[in-house]
Image (cartoon, rainbow, N blue to C red):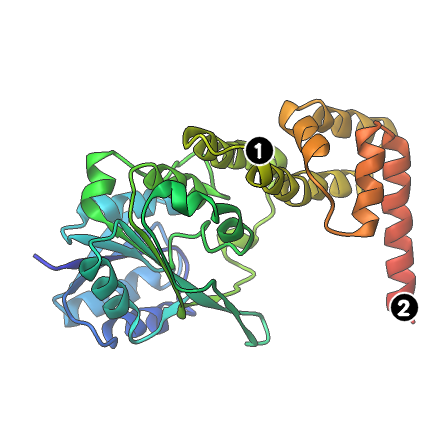
Amino acid sequence: MPLLSIIVPVYNSEKYLESTINSILNQNFSDFELILVNDGSSDNSAKICETFKNTNAKIKVINQENLGVSEARNAGIKAASGQYIQFVDSDDFIHPDMSKTLINCIKSHKADIVICGYLKFDQNNQSKVISMPDKIYTSIKDFANDIMLFSKTWLLNTPTNKIYCTKIIKDNNIYFDKNFNLGEDLLFNCEYLKHSNLIINLKEPLYNYVCNINSLTHEKHQNFYENQKIIYTQLRNLIVYLDMFNGSLKKDFYTFYLNTVVIYPIEKISLENIHVNKKIYQIRKILKESITEESLKYGTADSLFYNLIFFFLKHKYIRTTIFVFNIKKLILKSIHRK
């Protein structure tokens, strides 16, 4: 039985897939199985998976109809036989020491989860380090003090910069929610953390995330607000569950929620080519949500401009908000022309 199961959900990834698989196979660690879950690909991804499987005994291939990334990862979890689980996306690649470093860390400290930094590559192949300082959290409550910092940097949200204990996942029936295709990773991690105590963060960026405009992450989501509201309500519920939703942590959550979840759909609605009455109706619907009201009450803006916007929203000056966003658009367009 391998020590580690590495799960890769695959969907129409022929451009990157060989590079991803090779980064896993050529790493400085050998005690693993690689589970490739072909999620109904219509390109050459399935063929690439089978070719690798035929040349390497470590590789398992699962073929399923297109059910989405959550169900692909879930299929990998169910097939995993390793003591630990690691996720890699099919358009990314890992550092040669990633699995070895995370495994040594989780074993030596008897930790429940290890998180590491990552390199984010943009469309021009320019990289940016996303990480936080090395730290050992001796309890989930200890970790909760920094949970908003992890969320703001997206170190918490993704499953790919982590190593998990298979037993915790399977014993507590923790799987990715198939009803979400944006933010389902955070739901999974919040549920996993409820069953975790010793949590370790490593500063070193060992995962390489490649921004792919064709990936699920970059697809347009019509129900962005409803989707994100549910997901970040679960993050709030985790903090409430730990009896820590107060003081600066409460303020940090609502500030994050306001700037990340609320403002994007309201700005988008304001700029849509629809009748103003429809815009007002949709924005008013968001403002009536209790979590939005709480965010406007306890949160703060990230800039002077949004401080003005939040003032308008707090006092229900919806027409003014729409007008200001459209003026902003015109100004930016004018600047870009010059």
List the residue tagged with mark 1.
Answer: 229
On the image, the x and y values in percent for residue 8 come to 31, 57
Q: In this image, 123 relative to 134: left or right?
A: right
Could you say which is closer to the camera, residue 39 or residue 173?
173
Q: In this image, 158 relative to 285: left or right?
A: left
Local crowd at mark 2 within 10 Å, few (<14), some, or many (≥20)? few
Looking at this view, name the residue that lies furthest to the left: 1
- 268 lies above or below 238: below
Question: Residue drawn at (34%, 62%), measured in percent from left and top?
Answer: 45
Q: Quadrant of the N terminus?
A: bottom left
Q: Hey, what amino acid is under mark 2?
A: Arg
Residue 292: numbered disc: none
Q: Secondary structure at mark 2?
A: helix
Could you say which is closer to the camera, residue 36 or residue 105?
105
Q: Hey, what amino acid is under mark 1?
A: Lys
Question: Residue drawn at (75%, 28%), measured in percent from left and top?
Answer: 282
Foreground mark, 1 or 2, reads 1
Could you say which is closer to the camera, residue 235 or residue 181?
235
On the image, the x and y values in percent for residue 335 come to 90, 66
Local crowd at mark 1 within 10 Å, few (<14), some, or many (≥20)? some
Q: How many marks?
A: 2
On the image, the x and y values in percent for residue 131 come to 48, 64
List the residue tagged with mark 2.
Answer: 337
Q: Is residue 68 visible to the viewer in this orientation of the structure?
A: no
On the image, the x and y values in percent for residue 291 come to 63, 28
Work out whether mark 1 precedes mark 2 in sequence or the reverse, and give the earlier one. 1
Write down the quadrant of residue 87 in the picture: bottom left
